[in-house]
Amino acid sequence: MSPAVNHWTFGIAPVVLAKTRPGATGVRWPFTSGRAREALSFCACGSTTIMAVEFDGGVVIGADSRTTTGAYIANRVTDKLTPIHDRIFCCRSGSAADTQAIADAVSYQLGFHSIELDEPPLVQTAANLFKQMCYRYREELMAGIIVAGWDKRRGGQVYTVPMGGMLVRQPVSVGGSGSSYIYGFIDSKYKSGMTKEECLRFTADALALAMERDGSSGGVVRLAAITESGLERSVILGNQLPTFFSA
Amino acid sequence: RGTFNLKASPVGAVLFVSLCRNTLLEANVAKLGCSLPPARKTGTTICGVVYKDGVVLGADTRATEGMVVADKNCSKIHYISPNIYCCGAGTAADTEMTTQLISSNLELHSLSTNRLPRVATANRMLKQMLFRYQGYIGAALVLGGVDCNGPHLYSIYPHGSTDKLPYVTMGSGSLAAMAVFEDRFKPNMEEEEAKQLVRDAIAAGIFNDLGSGSNIDLCVITKGKVDYLRPHDEANKKGVRTGDYKYKHGTTGVLTKQVTTLQLEVMDESVQTMDTS
């Protein structure tokens, strides 16, 4: 498969160099050579915790703020909640370079599409654009993305596009390396029909728990609530995080 | 399946025509009995800080080839546009060529838009190019400048990810420099305070990291003015030799002296002056 570079991908399709270079051990892991390995470490899911929850009238999204290069924290106040359109955001996990490039490409495509349609785009459209790019270049990319937003047709929606390029809509979704630690919490504490404030509380609690246990997640908690009327962003600093039992 | 696409019209000046030859050489190095030349890296400590009126960029001046210092006073703060400068760490050739390429494209863009270029534009151009080369261009950059929206500072990694922050450090001495920043950075500092902070951060890198050394260069960018201070601080001046190892005439006694003149005929003598104006 040779990825074509066309104007939709902005010329950012990765150049596939000879995979059979002498000395290559056949491991297709992108970071084998020891050159600068920025963003989100060696873990398969990327060193992050991201989360999104639907409620009636919108979505709440949240993320931690740590970007690592190996064991060094390159940015301790990262903003992993990236706007794709006025009422559509994506939460990025995995390689920072890959997810930034994908998000830029999809914002461009979606902005163009929205102007053609002369109306705000659907969240499902944004999610499908992410899926198309993540699936097509699945061998070259390391990106786990949660797309969340509000549109007129279906209200608040959360779509998850994990590594590999699957697309599925879920009422609540978590991602990143820290997500493994909070599946139990999510499953037990989530109930449908929560209000916006309850969702914000739920997300903050879940992220705080994940950041406490996962070494690759930390910093501050960034939250955003997206509704028809607009967008409310907030930050919970390290000393204001919800506290739980710690051994 | 070792295919790769060479696009008909490459954007940018990096061509992979020597790839096949280089991979063959790499594979047969043991048989040939030699070693490949190591790429000259800049080791480096580079950093930048946003202060009240603009940004201050700083860099050390050592370039290394393996464990040997190749250049004791190289310039790591590169010009991008009159209001934007970029420090480069990583492979020296990559940082030099990448910044020159983007500087050229940005000048054309600026002429086309008839406006002073924005730092975000330079950032986009750099990140999209580095991502396209998937990290094979080893350029880690600190991009800073002042445009119509105020002062901006970005750090750009070789794989193409960028972070927009009030203070950044890159290079092998980045941890030492970041320690200084985390201790003493404050938002909206005065110019002298910011310059002193950057100077101290680079000094921390120079004295605690083997890959960084020599002098400290600063670049202070404000709205309408750029101070390129090279060197700002000669932290490592070459010492003065106190001993003299020359022997005076007469130290060794002369026993005999024999002079033989060479028979040379002057054929033609002409003087050609070179126009050096």
Image (spheres, coloured by chain):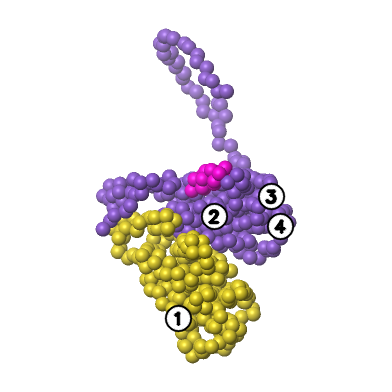
Q: Earlier in the sequence, mark 4 or mark 3?
A: 4
Residue pointed to by mark 3? B223
Q: Measure the C-alpha gap from mark 3 to mark 2.
A: 19 Å
- Which tag is nearer the camera, tag 1 or tag 4? 1
Q: Earlier in the sequence, mark 3 or mark 2?
A: 2
Q: Which residues are magenta?
A: B98-112
Kindly state the secondary structure of the residue where label 1 is placed. Answer: loop
**The C terminus of chain B - image quarter:** top right
Residue A114 percent location from the top left of the image: 50, 64
- Which tag is nearer the camera, tag 4 or tag 3? 3
Nearest the eye: B108 or A153:
A153
Of the numbered discs in the image, which one, if any, rests on residue B52?
4
Of the numbered discs in the image, which one, if any, rests on residue B123?
2
Which kind of residue does numbered mark 2 sit on? Asn
Residue pointed to by mark 1? A170
Tell me if A24 is positioned left or right of B194 in this view: left
